[in-house]
Image (cartoon, helix red, strand yellow):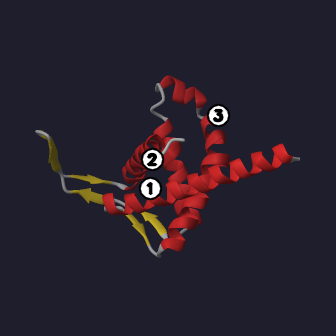
Amino acid sequence: MLTALIAWRSSMKGLLRRTLFNAFALFALSILLGGVTIHGGLQTLLFGGLILTFLTIFLEPILNLLSLPVTFVTMGLFSLITHAILFYVLTVLMPQIEVRAFVFPGTTLGGFVIPRMMLNTFFAYILAASLHSVIISTLNWLLRD
């Protein structure tokens, strides 16, 4: 009984942590990418983080299993598409979170020039999902136990 209670508490802590990380990543995406808009305040971010957490727990393994042959052939690159699908499902479930086409103004980073480019909705989802993964990985690395 005690071990079940400890395991439940540990899993709830992990669920809360993932939800907060996803909420922060959504907030950061809305600042970094012009195509990601979040209508609402903290409640929308937290609820969006919770939905994204449940999508990654339940839907992502199914998508990964279904796309396993394609992911194998593309050496893991197709996983960007599965993350983009998760973001699409999130925007369907929460209309307050919106990913749309936008124009990247271009920038120069350490001598490298990234030109101005227009991203359609498909690539906006892929860029948002990729950047979300980078933010989550960075947070996990910085705040590991």
Vertical arrangement, residue 37 with respect to residue 120, above or below: below
Q: Amino acid at mark 2?
A: Leu
Asked whether 77 or 24 is in front, the reply is 24
What is the spatial separation of the Cα atoms under label 1 and label 2, in whole angstroms? 9 Å
Neighbourhood count class around disc 1 (C-alpha, 10 Å): few under 14, some 14–19, many 20 upward: many
Q: Amino acid at mark 3?
A: Leu
> Which one is earlier in the sequence, the residue at label 3 or at label 2?
3
> Which one is earlier in the sequence, the residue at label 3 or at label 1?
1
Residue under label 2, please give it. Answer: 139
- Outermost residue, front side: 2
User: Is disc 1 in contact with disc 2, using a CB cutoff of under 8 Å?
Assistant: yes
Neighbourhood count class around disc 3 (C-alpha, 10 Å): few under 14, some 14–19, many 20 upward: few
Neighbourhood count class around disc 2 (C-alpha, 10 Å): few under 14, some 14–19, many 20 upward: some
Q: Where residue 124 appears, x then y in whole percent?
A: 37, 53
Residue under label 3, please give it. Answer: 65
Vertical arrangement, residue 76 with respect to residue 96, above or below: above
Residue at image coords 40%, 67%: 37
Q: Is residue 11 visible?
A: yes
Number of numbered discs visible in the structure rendering: 3
Q: Secondary structure at mark 2?
A: helix
- Outermost residue, left side: 111
Asked whether 16 or 126 is in front, the reply is 16
User: Is disc 3 in contact with disc 2, using a CB cutoff of under 8 Å?
Assistant: no
Q: Where residue 39 appears, x then y in whole percent?
A: 45, 74
